[in-house]
Amino acid sequence: MGFRPLHDRVLVRRVEAEEKTAGGIIIPDTAKEKPQEGEVVAVGGGLRAENGSINPLDVKAGDKILFGKWSGTEVKLDGEDLLIMKESDILGIVA
């Protein structure tokens, strides 16, 4: 993919939501919520501090992350739905 986010932004691919509940009930597409978990595809170079130095991001490509429900901006790149968000919108890295 020929896209690199700028500064402290991160490009994220959503992880697909489960089709069934733990009890075996199948969830129709209209009732599914968008997942709040994703995989980092690309990261920016980092945020520039007041003294001019660049602070690198804590996440890297390939990390599985959790993010807020309304975080990021949805974009379509190479026919794929992705999210661009600031690193501050990321809640944590899933181990």
Image (tube, helix red, strand yellow):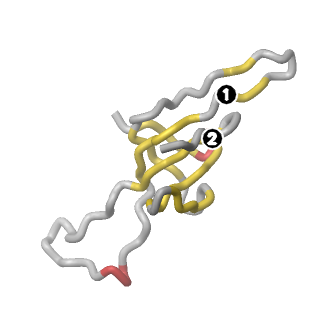
From the viewer's side, name the closer residue of 22 and 85.
Answer: 85
Residue 1's place in the image compared with 29, above or below, is above
Residue 81 screen position, x and y as percent: 47, 61
**Callout 2: helix, strand or loop?**
loop
| Quadrant location, the C terminus | top left
Q: Earlier in the sequence, mark 1 or mark 2?
A: 2
**Residue 64 falls in which quadrant of the image?**
top left
Residue receiving disc 2: 5
Q: Is residue 13 left or right of residue 28?
A: right
Q: Which mark is residue 46?
A: 1
Q: Is residue 51 left or right of residue 92?
A: right
Give the residue drawn at x 26%, y 78%: 27
Residue that appears at 59% across and 51% down:
84
The residue at the point 46 percent across, 41 percent down is: 40
**Total marks drawn?**
2
Residue 33 at what x, y percent from top left? 41, 71
Q: List the single residue furthest toward the left.
A: 24
- Mark 1 and mark 2: Cα distance apart in space: 10 Å
Query: Given this view, does label 1 or label 2 mark the residue nearer the observer?
Result: 2
**Crowd class of label 1 (few under 14; some 14 to 19; many from 20; radius 10 Å):** some
Residue 53: x and y in percent read 77, 15
Task: Residue type at mark 2: give it.
Answer: Pro
User: Relative to the observer, which residue lies in front, 30 or 74?
Assistant: 74
Residue displayed at 60% across by 27% down: 57
In contact (CB < 8 Å): disc 1 and disc 2: no
**Residue 28 position within the rendered picture, expressed as x and y whole percent measured from the top left:** 28, 82
Q: Which mark is residue 28?
A: none
